[in-house]
């Protein structure tokens, strides 16, 4: 391709187009306006989406990636617009989701002089310092001739190894400077390959697994990200290994598969904990031994290492052996690693007739035991509850429907109670549990999967943090469904206050006046004001019709479910957080 003159903004758009980025999402301002102008002429190749808050732009891109597997670009102006991305970027970082964030900057020659919205309070150009801890890498482009090198590095960094968000800051003069279009390809896709593990580590892992008396697969978000579900289920079924999943991997093996062993940890499942305790070898794949999955790292609570031994596969060397000593470490992408592992295991031993074993029968007993506990909660009686509302939603949602959660009671309840059957149909702000994530992320998920129903399941507090993005969904006619469990408050935290400190010690968690009267937001009316379809449901008998109508209406839709406020009917009885540092002068409630 020949070189041609263009401006910096146009060259950046050229990079996005070459990397097949389908949408640029954001809010313009003077600091990014030349880049935005360059998008106009490329509208056939890259779409644009206007959001109502920059945090939502990143969440939207995050939701898109988790379903589509390819990144979007986010753009913001300088100053507050850029700073507004931080929660979004941190959320993406916590779950290893790539997003390319472009923020504007003032003129390079005005940095530190007092230019409008410049962030140079303590050091020049400090926004990069703000965002650095929550991105894989940040670049401040001060000269237009750096654009191509930086954009190439940005895409490669975001997408290679353990993926994650990256940041590129562009001064106003960089965007408007004359540059030449490079004659070489701008696409990063043709240079990136998967990280293959060392075959000798695969050999050792295969031996450890084949020789194990009772192995268990601990599967984390790395398997969802690598789309390695086929290889995972292949390995599990060849040897009859139970599979434990997490918030980021729920559904990589269908939850009605007999080898699915649900979740570990006190906020996981009884089944998962029993399966893990029985195991001698823990095969962790893209699994970071988080606090919840590990039972707050208390020896014997979930894991006992040693005597339990670990085979750990991860694309990030920092994860291998981070929390527990590892017998075999395999450094590599979960997809090729599991593929190679399966091939070695198949060469070492024939498929095992696991369905006749005692261990399998035990697993089925434990699965049923857990499913009965869940059923007791979802079908306790005929009254309204979050669990009941979720069970009815599951009945109306096809197996390939996508649900999103972010925080509060809904995140835990959907994790524990809502059966998921296909990979990446349960997507959650797992590591950061960010209120406000689900609604904008659902818009992104729906863009990635326009033919499947997409439902954000949120509490009222979660919804009210980003509800303005209903305007975005209405503007672009993106028919997401938002199911809001309205209990007028931050009741999961209120319930924590009650559980730890007592019923009389709740504060700033209930939306009520001093005299106790509840201040209720009419969420259905609020949704209607944005132009969305909406319905408030108080009678549980009307839930299923409301979901049916919302899913069929073809517009952005909000089902507001009025759920109980009393402790403990408000939330979840299926397990609690096991490690809370009580104030030393207080006794936990249950010990009083
Ligand atoms: C941005 C953000 N702020 C604060 C928290 C801490 N937090 C976790 S759950 C929660 C309450 C959520 O309220 P709501 O969405 O109404 O759900 P509910 O607890 O009532 O089920 C809070 C404040 C958080 N996770 N994210
Ligand atoms: Mg609430």
Image: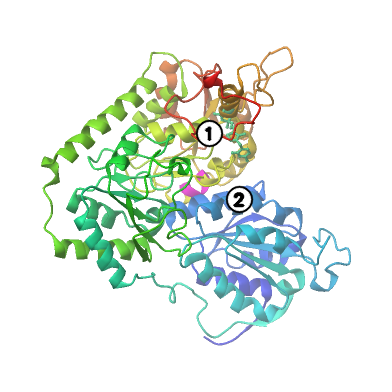
Q: CA distance from mark 1 to mark 2?
A: 17 Å
| Circle number at residue 88 | 2
Q: Find the residue positioned furthest to the bottom.
A: 2
Q: Secondary structure at mark 2?
A: helix
Depicted 545 relative to depicted 419: above or below: above
Task: Give the camera-side residue of 224 and 287.
Answer: 287
Depicted 201 relative to depicted 72: above or below: below
Task: Give the camera-side residue of 402 and 195.
Answer: 195
**Mark 1: few/some/many CA within 10 Å (<14, 14-19, 20+):** many
Q: Tell me the residue that label 1 is attached to.
A: 458
Q: Give the image location of residue 221, x and y in percent.
A: 42, 52
Mark 2, ligand 1, within 8 Å: the answer is no
Q: Is residue 279 magenta?
A: no
Q: Is residue 286 left or right of residue 114?
A: left
Residue 32 seen from this side? no
Q: Is residue 443 magenta?
A: yes
Highlighted magenta segment, given as a residue range: 442-446
Q: Give the image location of residue 267, x and y in percent.
A: 44, 34
Q: Is residue 106 left or right of residue 8?
A: right
| Circle number at residue 236 | none
């Amino acid at each position: 391709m020949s070189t041609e003159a263009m401006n910096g903004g146009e060259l950046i758009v050229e990079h996005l187009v070459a990397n097949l980025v389908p949408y640029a999402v954001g809010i313009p301002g003077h600091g990014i306006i030349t880049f935005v102008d360059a998008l106009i002429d490329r509208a056939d190749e890259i779409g644009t989406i206007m959001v109502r808050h920059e945090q939502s732009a990143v969440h939207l891109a995050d939701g898109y990636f988790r379903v589509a597997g390819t990144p979007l670009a986010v753009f913001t102006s300088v100053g507050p617009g850029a700073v507004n991305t931080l929660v979004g970027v941190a959320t993406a970082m916590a779950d290893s989701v790539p997003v390319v964030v472009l923020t504007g900057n003032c003129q390079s020659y005005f940095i530190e002089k007092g230019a409008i919205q410049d962030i140079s309070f303590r050091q020049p150009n400090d926004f990069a310092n703000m965002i650095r801890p929550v991105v894989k890498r940040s670049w401040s482009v001060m000269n237009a001739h750096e654009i191509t090198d930086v954009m190439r590095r940005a895409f490669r960094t975001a997408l290679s190894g353990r993926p994650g968000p990256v940041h590129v800051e562009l001064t106003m003069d960089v965007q408007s400077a004359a540059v030449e279009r490079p004659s070489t390809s701008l696409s990063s896709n043709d240079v990136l390959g998967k990280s293959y593990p060392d075959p000798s580590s695969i050999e050792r892992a295969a031996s450890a697994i084949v020789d194990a008396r009772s192995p268990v697969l601990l599967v984390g978000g790395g398997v969802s990200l690598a789309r390695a579900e086929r290889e995972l289920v292949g390995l599990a079924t060849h040897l009859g290994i139970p599979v434990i999943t997490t918030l980021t991997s729920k559904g990589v093996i269908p939850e009605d598969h007999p080898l699915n062993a649900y979740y570990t940890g006190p906020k996981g499942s009884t089944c998962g904990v029993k399966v893990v305790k029985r195991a001698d070898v823990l095969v962790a794949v893209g699994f970071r031994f988080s606090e919840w999955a590990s039972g707050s790292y208390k020896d014997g609570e979930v894991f006992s290492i040693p005597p339990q031994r670990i085979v750990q596969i991860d694309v990030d060397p920092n994860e291998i052996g981070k929390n527990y000593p590892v017998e075999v470490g395999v450094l590599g992408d979960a997809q090729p690693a599991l593929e190679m592992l399966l091939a070695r295991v198949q060469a070492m031993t024939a498929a095992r007739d696991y369905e006749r074993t005692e261990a399998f029968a035990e697993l089925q007993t434990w699965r049923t035991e857990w499913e009965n506990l869940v059923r007791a909660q979802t079908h306790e009686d005929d009254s309204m509850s979050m669990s009941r509302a979720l069970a009815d939603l599951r009945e109306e949602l096809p197996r390939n429907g996508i649900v999103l959660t972010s925080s509060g009671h809904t995140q835990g309840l959907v994790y524990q109670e809502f059966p998921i059957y296909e990979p990446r149909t349960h997507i959650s702000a797992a590591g950061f549990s960010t209120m406000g994530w689900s609604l904008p992320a659902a818009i992104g998920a729906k863009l990635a999967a326009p033919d499947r129903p997409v439902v954000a399941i949120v509490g009222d507090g979660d919804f009210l943090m980003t509800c303005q993005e209903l305007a975005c969904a209405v503007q672009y006619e993106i028919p997401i469904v938002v199911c809001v469990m309205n209990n007028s408050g931050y009741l999961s935290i209120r319930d924590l206050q009650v559980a730890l400190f007592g019923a009389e010690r709740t504060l700033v968690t209930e939306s009520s006046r001093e005299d106790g009267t509840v201040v209720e937001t009419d969420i259905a009316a609020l949704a209607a004001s944005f132009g969305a379809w909406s319905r408030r449901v108080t009678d549980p008998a009307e839930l299923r019709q409301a979901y049916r109508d919302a899913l069929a209406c073809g517009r952005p839709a909000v089902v507001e479910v009025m759920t109980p406020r009393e402790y403990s009917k408000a939330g979840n009885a299926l397990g609690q957080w096991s490690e809370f540092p009580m104030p030393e002068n207080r006794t936990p409630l249950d010990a009083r």
